[in-house]
Amino acid sequence: MIAPLADTATDVNVGEQIVFWVTAILSVAGALGMVLSRKAVHSALWLALTMINLAILYVANSAPFLGMVQVIVYTGAVMMLFLFVLMVVGVDSSDSLIETIKGQRLASIVFVLGVGILLVWGIGNSMVETSSVGLDAANAEHGGHIEGIANVLFTQYLLVFELVAAVLITAAMGAMVLAHRERWTPRPSQRDLARARFTDGGHPGNLPNPGVYARHNAVDTPALLPDGGTSDISVPGPVRARGDERSFDRVDIEEVRAISEGETTLPEEGRE
Amino acid sequence: MTDSQFGLFGADPWWLVLLKVVALFAILVLLTLFTIWWERRVVSRMQNRIGPNRVGPQGLLQSLMDGIKLALKEEIIPTSAHLAVYWIAPVISATMAFLAFAVIPFGPEVSIFGVMTPLQLTDFPVSVLYVLAIASIGIYGIVLGGWASGSTYPLLGGLRSTAQMISYEIAMGLSFVAVFIYAGSMSTSDIIIAQEPIWFAVILLPSFIIYVTAMVGETNRAPFDLPEAEGELVGGFHTEYSSLKFALFFLAEYINMVTVSALATTLFLGGWRAPWPLSLWEGANEGWWPMLWWLLKVQIFIFVFIWLRGTLPRMRYDQFMRFGWKILIPVSVVWIVIVAAARIMRNDVALSTTEILVSGAVVIVVLLVGSWLIQARQDRRQRAIDEAEAEAAAAPFDPMAGGFPVPPLPGQSFTYTSRRASAQGTTIVQERAAEVVAEEDDDTSDGEDNNG
């Protein structure tokens, strides 16, 4: 499929071609979408699409380990953390396109061109000058590509591997140290919080509901206390602050009592 | 390393592959319907109820009817939703749930329409990693669903769910490592072959326990179902979803349950291999019988899921995260080191049993002495710290020590004094004020004198 790296350039079958063209188009589309999206979350999603398609390409190129690790590490962990931060910070609106760093665009174009030239040069070199032996011959020594990778990683590149691990752990520790807050007072436990809630005479549970009478059941009606008075806290604070609290009307209560005890009948207009 | 079976895969004709794919799909959907019914019945029994028993025999068709009802319900999309992402999130969730099952082995080679083929869609050298990778893409469905709903509770639920799944995926991946070391392979079919004499659940018991714990966290099930804590987050990430999209999330959750159970079966319980008393029978590991053993083992795990839900209260979020990061992961790492060391001793250093026992005793003695020394040192240090703290606590707290506002040292408590009072010297204004007060005092005392 990516023919030049293998000896068997002519062995490309239809299935491989289909896989190549689909993933190639999707990964380029994902890259473009990532650059052109206005929303940060959309950019992250496009990038995830590119990563997944690259992983499929790796698998199709007989490098399943690389493909899976790419998905687990980059798509599953790194991109997910990006998304996480974007969502927590709430970068919801589209970012402005004004250059914040002077000459950023020019610099980025120069760097992109530089990386492009390096890549083309490196890959071209490897295609022209290095002779490839094919996958089977390369895997023959250790009996499989995973065994081969493990062998190289844990012998020849062991020091580099461990250095990278150390750098990453240092970065993580650094972030934790920077974000660390020294506690000067002990953290209040659930018991402390509960005790504090109940001892200072506040209202630990729900506030009483507004009064529901036969005539009124809106939140502006205060609840009736056992002693016949009204409860102020049963009416929401804003209603009280606006002065919209309905004054307690004893006539209503009296009327309801009279009706319920059969002393009078309901008013005529209330009946069918 | 045992003989690899990869020669068996990739040789199927196209119609057989298609047949396997359709069969997998059907099995998963049926298992989901069955699991929902089974869960409701079992939880009912545990709560002294009867559970659904009206639709079909024993209420077996209840979840099918519920599914049809769910699909026909009105779809409500919030106006603040990010439409494209809102649409794709449940699709990602459900698709990834199905995909993960491609590498799960159901049984040995059987004959289907005259073609000998293993009862497994496909396998490759890193198929267990493939399951991990697919699971990590599946999380996207949840986090995107939470974000795209454009509402607070789903966002919080989605974030919780993601944090939880990422954290527990680490413990899960670490529990695989011991299996990989013992099986010498990362492919599911090879791992089953490697469990020929004895299950990995027995020889790698800590890994098994860690995996079973992590798989409950990974699937957001009780007691780790914090993303769906009704009292805190309504429905979590799927609060704003309704109709078929909600059904997809629901389907994904139950398929994930089956997937992690099947993976546990494959990695630790010998997969489709018959358990001990049955394995005495010659034909137990041939033909279609293994699929039955596989199904029974998976159902045991699913029963455990249901049992947990019926028994345990939900954990608090900070306890849950502390458990994952401070207990499961360190224990896994230590266990992997032990397994790797044991493996190297068996493979590279030919040791006799006596030598292993003697060296083990030496190691234990060294550890004991070392821990005693460390403990003694820590005690000394702690005493010194306590003394220093007591000394500091005895000294009064100076909120302006060194001329700057400072917090209290450990052991000291806040004293809310006026800054001005502790400031050195007095300002001109204060002096003037003091003079005025003094004059007034003089005046009043004069007046009193006059009155008297």
Image (cartoon, rainbow, N blue to C red):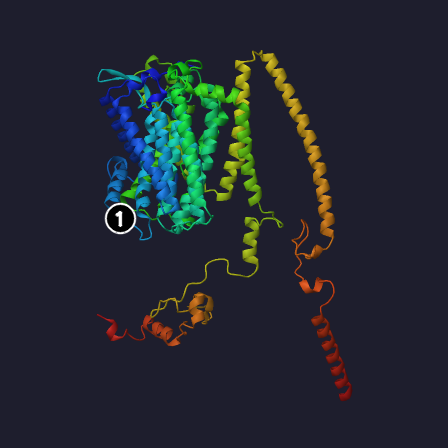
Amino acid of disc 1 = Glu
Task: Point out the image quarter for the C terminus of chain B.
Answer: bottom right
Residue sitting farthest toward the bottom: B451
Q: How many marks?
A: 1
Taking the image as shown, residue B20 lies to the left or right of residue B276, namely left
Asked which quadrant contains residue B372, the reply is top right
Question: Would you place residue A227 above or below residue B230 in this image?
Answer: below
Question: Would you place residue B339 above or below residue A269 in this image?
Answer: above
State the SS at label 1: loop
User: Who is closer to the viewer here, A20 or B120?
Assistant: A20
User: Who is closer to the viewer here, B446 or A255?
Assistant: B446
Task: Point out the image quarter for the N terminus of chain B.
Answer: top left
User: Who is closer to the viewer here, A240 or B190?
Assistant: B190
Taking the image as shown, residue B362 lies to the left or right of residue B208, namely right
Q: Position of residue A230 (x, y in %)?
A: 45, 70
Asked which quadrant contains residue A16, the reply is top left
Question: Would you place residue B439 above or below residue A30 in this image?
Answer: below
Q: Position of residue B222 (x, y in %)?
A: 42, 39
Could one spot residue B254 in this view of the protein? Answer: yes
Dot 1 falls on which chain?
Answer: B
Residue at image coords 28%, 30%: A21
Judging by the rendered image, the residue that carries numbered circle 1 is B75
Could one spot residue B225 in this view of the protein? Answer: no
Q: Position of residue B57 (x, y in %)?
A: 25, 35
User: Who is closer to the viewer here, B344 or B368?
Assistant: B344
Residue at image coords 58%, 12%: B353
Q: Position of residue A178 (x, y in %)?
A: 57, 44
Taking the image as shown, residue B414 lies to the left or right of residue B226, namely right
Q: Residues within 10 Å of mark 1 (few under 14, many from 20)?
A: some
